[in-house]
Image: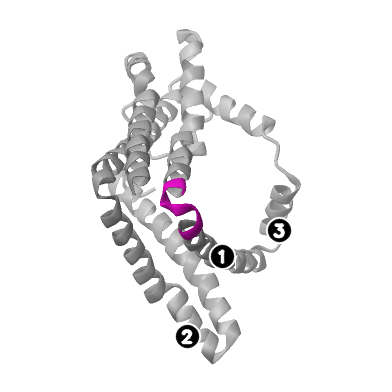
Amino acid sequence: MIELTLILALSGVLLIMSALFRLRRFGRYKVLRTTLENQFDVSNLDLSGRTEYSNCFSHQWYIDIMRTTKHGRIGEWFQRQMTDRTIATFLWFAVLLGSAAMILGMVLISSIRLLQAGLLVLLFTLIVMVGSGGVNISEELLIALLRIKQDEYRRDDYPYVRIGMRTIVTWSVFCLVVGIVFLISAPFNSLLLDLVGTGVVLFGDAVLWGPMFSLFNVWAPLGVVYISLVVPFIFIIIPVTIYMLYQRIRFGPA
């Protein structure tokens, strides 16, 4: 398992470097934030992201980005279906998501057996380094704000700047934490794999495919309905609810 040790160490270094690379402009972002704070009264602005501020460069920049972003045929079809037949589309989407989760789990287990865990670690590292759409758009917006003249700034730009900075910091901290975990766990790769594998098996057997197969033995459609509902609930509804509670606790009710 020497290869996995090297891959974990390399992935940890890459993730830490990626986080530091994202933070390289943070000093300039702070200057931008301070400039807006000195130029405008921003004390009563909502920084939670729940209020839309439109009288600013940032809002127009987002509008331009959305206009230039082309959706594929599947994306346009899905948007139409969600508008016209919301409940039916959601149920079908839940079925597809649940089935995809089951297939993904099988592929993941097969990949670990055939390709070993090192390739999966590298793939995960690459995905994290690329970053989410939110953090990349935040970076592009802040860079665009740095390029315009100071007299083009508006008071409503401030929430966009703060939210963008928070998004970048959150993602960078995530990269740092994962990178440090990879570095620390590199010498103990076998133990790490055993713990992860045991956790996945126990969780899946208790919550996902265990109950699903039990319901399959009773009536096959029950198993399909169960996995189709429990996967969105665990991986979408619960995280969104936690995030909304966090927003409410930090910024107060809307």
Q: Nearer the viewer, mark 2 or mark 3?
A: 2
Packing grade of label 3 (10 A; few <14, some 14-19, many >=20) is some
- From the image, give the main secondary structure of the stretch colored magenta: helix
- Inspect the image, locate mark 1, and give the three-letter code of the amino acid beneath it: Ile
Residue depicted at 37% across the width and 51% down the height: 243
For badge 3, the amino acid type reads Gln
The residues bearing labels 2 and 3 have C-alpha atoms spaced at a distance of 33 Å
Q: Which residues, given as a range, are shown in magenta?
A: 113-119
Residue picked out by circle 2: 214
- Residue 81, disc: 3
Going by the image, does 95 lie left or right of 34? right
The residue lying at 60 percent from left, 83 percent from top is 221
The numbered mark, 2 or 1, whose residue comes first in the sequence reads 1
How far apart marks 2 and 1 lie (CA) works out to 18 Å
Task: Provide the residue designation for mark 1.
Answer: 103
The tag earlier along the polypeptide, 2 or 3, is 3
Q: Quadrant of residue 31?
A: top left
Q: Position of residue 126 (x, y in %)?
A: 47, 38
Q: How far apart are labels 3 and 1 at the CA level?
A: 25 Å
